[in-house]
Image: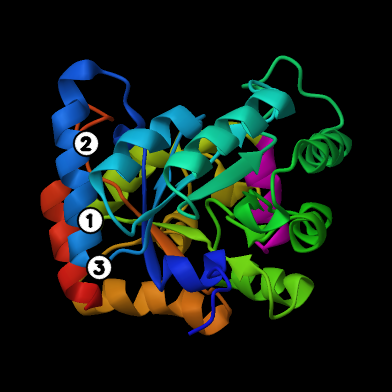
Amino acid sequence: MSDTPASVKEQVGRYGIWNVGLRSEDPARRGAIAEAAAELEELGFGAVWLGGNSATRHATPLLQATKRLVVGTSIQSIWDYTAEDSAAGYAEVEAAHPGRFVLGLGVSHAKLAEQYRRPYSAMVAYLDALDAAGVPVERRVLAALGPKMLQLSRDRAAGTIPYLVTPEHTARAREILGSGPLLAPEFKVVLEEDAERARTVARGYLAMYLQLPNYTSNFLRLGFTEDDVRGGGSDRLIDAVFAWGSESRIRERIEEFRAAGADHVVVQVVTDAEDQDALPVQEWRRLAALLA
């Protein structure tokens, strides 16, 4: 048997879960988070990606509660954590849980980061600093939408974790990345068969993202129009970036990403829960069953 460590691509498997609630620092939620992480591992998901501006400290409780699950940040903003702090956090979690943490980095958005300047150059400098601090290329991934950041994901990281994309974007990303790097797009699912209810839930969730030019510009590159990104999003846009409908239809939509070149599809279950940190455990169980 080889002693060569498994690559991130080999570790994460076909499907992962993206969630914000699993990064909660509320002490009252610790038990529920640990139980949810253990169940996600048991359900067969290979990785959990912590939404929001997450960091290594948010991954630790999930790693402690599981044996094999890979945990990644999706994403850690380069503006809010210095490369030195990221390297120190990585070293600590790697020592405690070898080979199970992935540092997912991103440049966030101008509306969310006051320091936002020349994001590509800033990411290059950040990766230079991580190299100097000894953070392995194979344990970091980048949030990438446009061609330049995708190329950087190919050349300076283990791959990419694009957020709010379509299978068409995945196909373009695979052409840029080549066959080796990890391509792990996030995809949103509403477990609802009624079109009106599903689209209402989806629009409520998408509204914030349609205020962020990084996403809307990417939609325009993919062939959507200005009308598609106004007013909460057209039906065409909603139906492209969310899966809803019968369980067989939802599975088909998820598999479209794999057919387009994704190695690992990161599924985010979207509900109409008022508490955005609520853990959709029942929905995760349904999702696992339909993907089995």
Q: Which residue is mark 1?
A: 40
Which comes before the other along the chain, label 1 or label 2?
2
Kindly identify the residue that appears in the image at 16 percent across and 19 percent down: 28
Magenta-drawn segment: 213-224
Above or below, comparing residue 94 to residue 291 in the picture: above
Nearest the eye: 180 or 277: 180
Q: Which residue is mark 3?
A: 44
**What is the secondary structure assignment of the residue under circle 2?**
helix
Which comes before the other along the chain, label 2 or label 3?
2
Q: Which residue is mark 2?
A: 33
Above or below, comparing residue 211 to residue 187 in the picture: above
Identity of the amino acid at label 2? Ile
- Asked if residue 103 shows in the view, the reply is yes
Kindly identify the residue that appears in the image at 25 percent across and 53 percent down: 198
**What is the secondary structure assignment of the residue under circle 3?**
loop
Identity of the amino acid at label 1? Leu
* Image location of residue 117, percent across then percent down: 83, 25
User: Relative to residue 275, is residue 265 drawn left or right?
Assistant: right
